[in-house]
Amino acid sequence: MSERPFSRPEHFHVAARPTVAEHAAVVASLVRGTLPGGSELVPLDEALGRVTVEPVASPVDLPLFRNSHMDGFAVRAADLAAAPVTLPVAAVVAATAGEPPALAPGTAIRIMTGAPVPEGADAIVPVEQVESRAETVTFAAPVAAGVFVRERGSDLRAGDELIPAGRRLASRHLAALAAAGLGEVAVRPRAHVAILTTGSELVDVGAVPRPGEIHDANAVAAAAAVVECGGVVALRGRAQDDRAVFDQLLGDAVRVADLVITSGGISQGDFEVVRESLLPRGGWVGTIAMQPGGPQALAMIDGVPVIGFPGNPVSTQLSFEAFVAPLLREHAGLPMASRTRRRLRSSIVSPAGRQQLLRARLAGDDEVEPVSGPGSHLVAALAAADAVIVVPAETTELPAAAEVEVWGL
Amino acid sequence: MSERPFSRPEHFHVAARPTVAEHAAVVASLVRGTLPGGSELVPLDEALGRVTVEPVASPVDLPLFRNSHMDGFAVRAADLAAAPVTLPVAAVVAATAGEPPALAPGTAIRIMTGAPVPEGADAIVPVEQVESRAETVTFAAPVAAGVFVRERGSDLRAGDELIPAGRRLASRHLAALAAAGLGEVAVRPRAHVAILTTGSELVDVGAVPRPGEIHDANAVAAAAAVVECGGVVALRGRAQDDRAVFDQLLGDAVRVADLVITSGGISQGDFEVVRESLLPRGGWVGTIAMQPGGPQALAMIDGVPVIGFPGNPVSTQLSFEAFVAPLLREHAGLPMASRTRRRLRSSIVSPAGRQQLLRARLAGDDEVEPVSGPGSHLVAALAAADAVIVVPAETTELPAAAEVEVWGL
């Protein structure tokens, strides 16, 4: 794993504790430059929910050809002017491959919905409105020219915009692309994200932990969060606290991913594998003014950003939400998670110097209620929350009814 | 394909044209009884976006054991009462498998975040707050019992509800399930839907149509719509207008699907393969008071509902939205598409006797604007719409600013 030149962002050197905004800006500057640009051609069957990169023009007129809106009879409107009138049925035209015969004056042609309208015909009379015998058809009333004829290009002309840029493709968009014969569509490429969890205490979710062990919730949650934000999990690995294993996984990760996320191994313990791996390569490991999620790490390894989160599942999840989710959503063209202002249902106190991310529930139309304590181990409490209250670092208390920033989960 | 007893719903026999509401009720009565009930156990990695069937209780206390919130020193608070005090460091406890030694009075134990708190210890002093030497540690201030100790079960007790019933699983829910060691979760089963398109004029989307042929947009759109509504496409087939092929596909479909959707083959033409197949088996083929989407068909084949839509892509898509999407969303536990009331931006006229589904765009906070004409071939216009205005069958004109029912797309 060779080191590419890496210009350390500003706060890599400052002694002061970076603010959440400062840290977010550094993460954004690292990640925005490395996520894949351009577009990816995907088959329609894989395009649901993907986002177009540029406007898609129709290569054809829609409808492709002048066709019948109804099951009925193709006629010249002029022939029915003196209705009632009975005309011989000269042919039957089905909706299938083939050029229909031209309509001779003074005749009718039986025609099915979607079938090409014979040359010479300028109206369709529905079968329900005629009296039809073996070889003749009787029209009770005149018909206006153009009735029940779908003109070629009446939906869209070749070259016209079929789908605009930035459209998240739903079934109706795929229908239009399919109708135009476009089997593939250019969409934003997905970010490939590697997830490396660390910690000797971690065991697989299905396993029975021995005393001192816990289940590796971060691997599951981070993978799901990446998918929620339109990304793809390129690799998932667990290094326990083994530096050689971590370095090997990190090497694999930067080869296959646009972005690497790690959990654990960056605080003040004796076995901090991420810290030990990243620091010698010019990485930054420090503490930002956020709780939970104070310990953070950043590095560029082989041109791929490595974003290190703390090991507690709540810290990792809220760090992802604060720093990575907005960038992945932006990249994927997905809507941002809601960021609103609401009024507190109850008063809160908050430690000075760190932006608090309080788990909360939305209440009423414009209120929000803190739930559970601030502990970064309260993974069930986070699952029960549907929002996060952001308490600025300098704020130490807020009365009920105070307006606060709220992130929707 | 044997016929099971099939009690024809009311409007199968009535001569009058069923209303949209009547038809929807019949479809619902057929489909609700046949979509799979119960639950399906899926691995967490496949559970994102699925919906829980019943409350999930945690099988364990969370945290699993009493552990340290910080990297620091485990102490008896009583030993620090007369701080400053210096204690010998008796052991180091990492976050890994193993029972820690008990803390002897008058000693401290170095401890890492997440490591089990030694028996006898009742507080953790963070490493940043001590002066630590090789074999001793000096505490400058007393500490309260309980500080930075995460008690077993302080997040959740074994048996407590971890995830409620009916929750659509996001990453934070999967994190909680993983933390509790649950590798699988019981979710609502997905509806398996077969999609059969008919029409000799249809060719694959990638193919170049000959004169008279068009691309099979319905297959693409219906498959995507099923997925949007939480279902799975169990089978997709195209029968052209060949009755034997259709019957074969239908036989396959009812073996693998909970619901079969067909497009085309049910109007007044000479080659109506769905009509010909369903009528002898007790099916209903008729016209309802809706536009687009007037022709409709229903049958029960081998206990599986067959819902027949017209062949025009717009008719099929809006029929799906009107009759099938709400049932699939309900079954999957997904939110319903929005149904609101808005004010018309411009006046409209509408034919009597049929509920119109007008393609429209939402405008401003509470307005809606019709776009394009009513033609069922306007597939590009539907793609450009983001809403449908519902004009009741008896309404023939509405002035600007009139309030109308609007479906969000």
Image (cartoon, coloured by chain):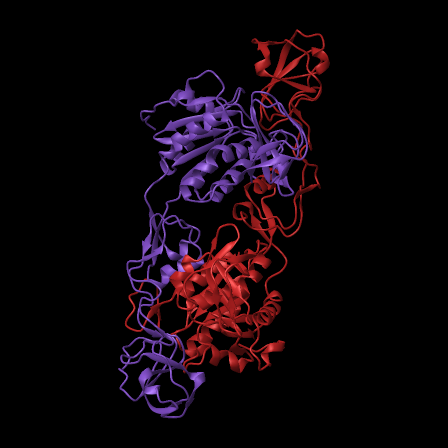
Chain colours: A purple, B red
Q: Which of A299 and B30 is in front in this view?
A: B30
Can residue B348 be seen at all in this image of the molecule? yes
Where on the picture, by quarter, is residue B124?
Answer: top right
Q: How many labels does the image show?
A: 0
Q: Which of B158 and B323 is in front in this view?
A: B323
Q: Nearer the viewer, residue A306 or A132?
A: A132
In the image, is residue A13 above or below residue A325? above
Where on the picture, by quarter, is residue B219?
Answer: bottom left
**Left or right of A68 in this view: A349:** right
Q: Quadrant of the N terminus of chain A?
A: top left
In the image, is residue B193 above or below residue A272? below
> At 38% from the left edge and 34% from the top edge, which residue is drawn?
A32
> At 38% from the left edge and 21% from the top edge, which residue is drawn?
A282
Can residue A207 be seen at all in this image of the molecule? no
x and y percent of residue B375 in the render?
Answer: 41, 69
In the image, is residue A379 above or below residue A80? above
x and y percent of residue B6 in the render?
Answer: 61, 77
Q: Quadrant of the C terminus of chain A?
A: top right
In the image, is residue B360 above or below residue A326? below
